[in-house]
Image (tube, rainbow, N blue to C red):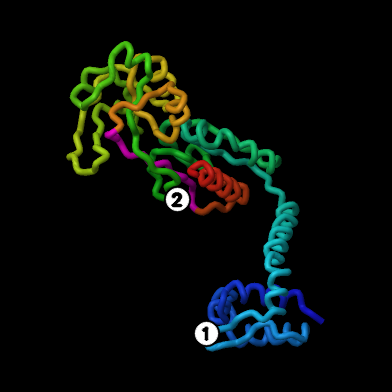
């Protein structure tokens, strides 16, 4: 009788390309591989692999068998995962703090996919624009551009970019468009708060040619904001130049609602962090992390 397990083993060996690689991939020995292949050949009464000094090639019968069952392992694995997933329906509550611009531009179009798939998981989202304390505020996950103070938090960079300057067409019509860093000092800039609540007065201007010396410049302005999305709206109103995240304002730039100022410069590096306490022991938490990473991967494309 032909063993289905031997057929799957045969497919894995062929995919590996050699007995040695197959032994490593399958965590077994070359002797075991030879024995299993021989057992399958005896059951089919056909030679499947033609051994040679470099490993093996497939016989005609081997080619036919491989072609028929190449995708069987993946199908079985997917079906099994689906069955196990249905038996272990996720339940519980996730408390998540998410940076406002990231939520609006990246997660918002997709978060329903997670909640529809896992209706027994209550997802509580709090929009943030400052540092939070995971333990004090009882958050399971935090997505933020600010690093945590806690030493027990686990941190992973999920996104990196450089901030750029933007204004609107109405701003240019009314106030003109600065062409140099020196001219920038004569314009109206929307300013931001640092994590600790301190107004940010200086930014490091970096030229894109990477050869020009970096310049620490003071941004003029009297209006300060903390929320990035609100900052974009203020910019589009036509009276301020502001810093923006290029990937998050692309839609506005394409539509002409925001125009890049001094495109040869960036004014600060920015990273977004996935922050959690220790390992993700909650199955719902692990599943949400996987979901979010897939969303980010698709969004970056």
The residue that appears at 23% across and 23% down in the rendered structure is 184
Q: Is residue 106 above or below residue 39?
A: above
Residue 156 location (% of width, % of height): 44, 49
Left or right of 170 on screen, residue 1: right
Q: Which mark is residue 170?
A: none
* Nearest to the observer: residue 285 or residue 301: 301
In the picture, residue 45 is in which quadrant? Answer: bottom right
The residue indicated by pointer 2 is: 154
The residue indicated by pointer 1 is: 54
Q: Quadrant of the N terminus?
A: bottom right
Q: CA distance from mark 1 to mark 2?
A: 46 Å
The residue that appears at 68% across and 83% down in the rendered structure is 37
Q: Secondary structure at mark 2?
A: strand
In the picture, residue 130 is in which quadrant? Answer: top left
Residue 295 location (% of width, % of height): 55, 43
How many other residues sit within 10 Å of disc 2, few (<14), some (14-19) or many (≥20)?
A: some
Residue 77 location (% of width, % of height): 69, 62
Range covered by the magenta-colored residues: 264-278
Main SS of residues in magenta: strand
């Amino acid at each position: 009788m032909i063993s289905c397990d031997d057929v799957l083993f045969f497919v894995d060996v062929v995919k590996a390309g050699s007995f040695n690689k197959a032994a490593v991939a399958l965590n077994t020995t070359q002797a075991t591989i030879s024995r299993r292949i021989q057992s399958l050949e005896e059951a089919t009464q056909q030679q499947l692999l033609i051994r040679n000094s470099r490993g093996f090639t497939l016989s005609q019968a081997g080619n036919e068998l491989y072609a028929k069952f190449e995708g069987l392992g993946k199908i079985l694995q997917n079906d099994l995962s689906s069955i196990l997933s249905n038996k272990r329906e996720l339940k519980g509550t996730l408390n998540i703090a998410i940076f406002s611009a990231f939520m609006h531009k990246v997660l918002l179009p997709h978060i329903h996919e997670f909640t529809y798939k896992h209706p027994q998981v209550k997802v509580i989202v709090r929009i943030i624009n400052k540092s939070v304390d995971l333990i004090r505020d009882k958050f399971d996950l935090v997505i933020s551009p600010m690093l945590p103070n806690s030493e027990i938090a686990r941190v992973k960079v999920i996104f990196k970019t450089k901030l750029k300057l933007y204004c609107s067409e109405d701003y240019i019509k009314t106030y003109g468009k600065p062409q140099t860093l020196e001219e920038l000092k004569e314009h109206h800039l929307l300013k931001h708060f640092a994590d600790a609540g301190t107004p940010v007065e200086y930014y490091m201007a970096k030229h894109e040619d990477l050869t020009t010396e970096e310049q620490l410049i003071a941004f003029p302005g009297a209006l300060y904001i903390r929320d990035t999305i609100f900052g974009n709206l203020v910019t589009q109103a036509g009276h301020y130049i502001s810093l923006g995240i290029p990937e998050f304002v692309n839609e506005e730039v394409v539509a002409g609602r925001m125009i890049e100022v001094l495109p040869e410069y960036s004014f600060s590096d920015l990273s977004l962090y996935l922050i959690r306490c220790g390992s993700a022991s909650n199955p719902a938490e692990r599943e949400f992390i996987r979901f979010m990473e897939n969303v980010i991967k698709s969004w970056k494309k």
